[in-house]
Amino acid sequence: MEQHFDYLVVGAGLFGSVFSHEMKRNGRSCLVIDKREHIGGNIYTSLRRGIPIHEYGAHIFHTSNPQVWEYVNRFAEFNHFINSPMAVYREEIYNLPFNMNTFSKLWGIKTPEEAKAMIQKQIQDMGIGEPSNLEEQALALAGRDVYEKLIKGYTEKQWGRPCTELPVFIIKRVPLRFTYDNNYFTDRYQGIPIGGYTAIIEKMLEGIQVRLHTDYRSFVRQQQDASAEGGDFISYDKVLYTGMIDEYFDYSLGSLEYRSLRFETEDLPEVSNYQGNAVINYTEKEIPYTRIIEHKHFEFGKGEGTVITREYPAAWTPGEEPYYPVNDEKNNRLFAEYQKLAQKEKKVLFGGRLGQYRYYDMDKVIEAAFELVKAETCNL
């Protein structure tokens, strides 16, 4: 017997879930598969000690798009969390983003004019011409103090190489703000869903078949074998693939590069408040992790005890989770060649950060999924 779907959606993360939900609203059927043991992709949150745990790093929803904000609020109530991370450099602690609180702590000044003059003097004293690497770019934008204490070590940990060996494009600008405002984002809408993100994905996927622990290639082979043998099998008209585009094509043109992350989570039942803030960055290169997340502060201190997560940057190798595409010139050229192959796949759509080899904020993921749904429904 054959069970037929309009779409096989590979990946139960945000992109695949928005697409599936919207296609269902348009009368199309979807089967969602995911190789992980849970839905939600990297925005998956679990619950521990009454505290929603961001299992794959801090995710703060922010957008300036009222349509997207209205959309996510259909699935959850959002709190009013404002992202105001801190940075630790040796025994010093600074506010992020780089603002007047940061500059006052660095130099003992009070006014924006003083801060601008200090930064400009440092830039002029170095006399950097056209920057040839990330270090020169950052120094030319922010001066020596901000770079040495708050950018250099963190960036080298994040990318796994010296700033002098990193391309300029990684830091196109340094957000220097000459106000006493610790809000990291400038978007109009910001918050975190009360209880975590997993409930949002569960609501999006209501009434849609989902199969976890299901690898795409193994699934395809199983259905082909079942069909050939006259057994029960699943067929579909199209595939939405949100995995790695180079993996889909068996790395036939070579492997795209990524950076990965490793998370070390610690349950502290006897500690009510570990660090006093949701996110604290550690900017010294000698400290191997880039930040510590204390999850309860995303919900304003609710929950018994506390849970913290140290986040370690890591080199990516096949089999590891790819978090950040390395969008340098070489990789972008290779991705463009994979896109040419993708355009020949008339029954396969590619979406999400891995399918489109692009770092996406969550609101941009939703916008991109909307665009794909629009394109598909125009053809219905």
Image (cartoon, rainbow, N blue to C red):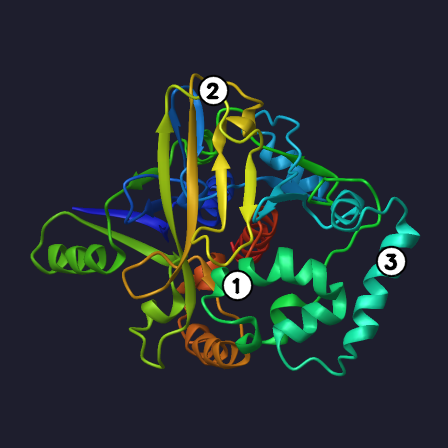
Check disc 1 and give the amino acid type. Arg
Residue behind mark 1: 358
Crowdedness near tag 1: few (<14), some (14–19) or many (≥20) residues, C-alpha within 10 Å: some
Report x, y in % for residue 192: 58, 32
Q: Is residue 336 left or right of residue 180?
A: left
Check disc 3 and give the amino acid type. Lys
Residue behind mark 2: 272
Q: CA distance from mark 3 to mark 1?
A: 34 Å
Asked if the residues shown at circle 3 and circle 2 are in contact, with their CB atoms under 8 angstroms apart, the answer is: no
Q: CA distance from mark 3 to mark 2?
A: 40 Å
Q: Is residue 46 above or below residue 168?
A: above
Residue behind mark 3: 116
Q: Which residue is at the front of the view, 284 or 133?
A: 284
Which mark lies nearer to you, 3 or 1?
3
Q: CA distance from mark 1 to mark 2?
A: 38 Å
- Quarter of the image for residue 163 reads bottom right
Q: Is residue 139 left or right of residue 55?
A: right
Label whose residue precedes the other's in the sequence (3 or 2): 3
Asked if the residues shown at circle 1 and circle 2 are in contact, with their CB atoms under 8 angstroms apart, the answer is: no
Label whose residue precedes the other's in the sequence (1 or 2): 2
- Quarter of the image for residue 189 reads top right
Q: Is residue 256 above or below residue 361?
A: below
Residue 319 disc label: none
Check disc 2 and give the amino acid type. Ser
Report x, y in % for residue 97: 70, 48
Q: Which residue is at the front of the view, 241 or 331?
A: 331
Helix, strand or loop status at disc 3:
helix
Q: Is residue 93 above or below residue 127?
A: above
